[in-house]
Amino acid sequence: MREQKYVVNNIDSFELKDIFECGQCFRWNKELDGSYTGIFKNNVINVKKENNKVIFEGICKDNIKEEIEEYFDLKRNYKKIKEELSKIDNNMKISIEYGQGIRLLNQDLWETIISFIISANNNIPRIKGIIEKLSKTYGKKIEWKGKEYYTFPTPKELSKATVKDLRSLGLGFRDQRVYETTKLVFTNQIDLNKLKEEKESKKIKETLLKMPGVGPKVADCILLFSTLKYLNVFPVDVWVRRVMNELYFNLPDETKLKRQQIENLAVQKYGNLAGLAQQYLFYWKREA
C-alpha cells in the first residue's frame, strides 16, 4: 500500500456529483472542498475536479492509473453513447443534458451483491450507514491523512457474522438474507469467479436470483453496476416506474404498470444501452 496520485486532463463525461450521487454506489462521501473520498477494493481515493483536470489521490495497493481507469470506466466512449441515446427522443435528450457527467462504475461484484441486498426498501443515507458499520466491524482498516477507513469485508470475513450480529448493525429484515447469501458464496455453492466468466446475462441473472434478497431489480443493478457491466439491463424501482409512466404510458395508477411492460419498451427504445438510459432518466427525474 502506498500513496499515489493520478491526473487526467480534458476528460469527457466526468462530473463528481453525477457519478457519486446517481444511486449506483454507497461508499463515496463529499468533502468540504467539494471533492469526494471513497473506498473500493483495497484503495482509499480522493477525487477532485479543477477546471478540466480530474485529480485522483490516495492510498492504493496496485498501480493507481490502472485501478482508476478500470473502476471509473475511463476507456468507454461516453460522448458517443450520449450522442446515440440523444437521438431517441426529447426525454432522453433532456435527461442526458441534466446528468451529462454520469459514468457507470465497475464495482467489485461481491460488494455490489451485498450492497444492493441492503438497498431493498431502504434510503441512501441509511444504506451508506449500514455498509460503513459492516465494513468497520468486519473489513480491514486503512489509515490515510489521519483518518481511518475500512475495506468492504470479503465473503470469508463476513461469514464470521451471525444473523444476530447483522441485526445489531441495523440491517433489519435484510439480516437473514445477507447471512444466507454470504454462506452460499463463502462455501462456493455459488461461484462468483464462474459467474464472471459466464457470457450470457440471462444465465447470470438466473444464478443471482438464487441468492436470498436478490429479486429482479437487485439482480439488474448487480449486472449494471458491478464489473459484470451489462448495459442492456433496465433496473425498475419505484422511481423508474414513475418516470416511465409519466413519460411514456400515462396510466392513472402508476402501480398498475407492470415491470415487463417497462422492460419491453426499454429494449425497444434503448437496445443495448438500456442501462445507461435508465441512469440518465432516473437521475434527472429524482434530482430535478
Image (cartoon, rainbow, N blue to C red):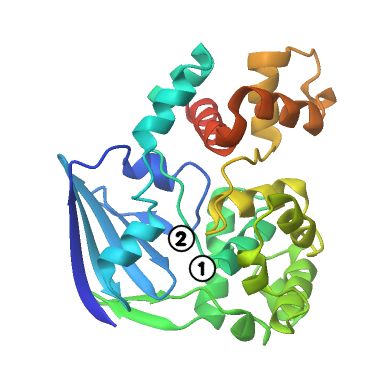
239 sits left or right of 53 in the view: right
* Camera sees residue 100: no
Q: Quadrant of the N terminus?
A: bottom left
Q: Amino acid at mark 2?
A: Arg
Q: Residue at x 23, y 52 (%)?
A: 48
Residue marked by disc 2: 27
Count all numbered tags in the image, as a single digit.
Answer: 2
Residue 143: % across, % down: 31, 80
On the image, the x and y values in percent for residue 5 come to: 18, 66
Corner quadrant of residue 235: top right
Which is more toward the observer, 254 or 52? 52
Query: Residue 132: which numbered mark, if any?
Result: 1
Q: Is residue 282 left or right of residue 56?
A: right
- In primary-sequence order, the first of circles 2 and 1 is 2
Based on the displayed image, in which of its 4 quarters is residue 19 positioned? top left
The vertical placement of 278 against 85, above or below, is below
Q: Are marks 2 and 1 in contact (CB under 8 Å)?
A: yes
Residue 277 falls left or right of residue 43: right
Residue 40 seen in this snapshot: yes
Percent across and percent down for residue 70 are 38, 59
Element at badge 1? helix
The residue sitting at 38% across, 31% down in the picture is 80
In front: label 2 or label 1: 2
Amino acid type, callout 1? Glu
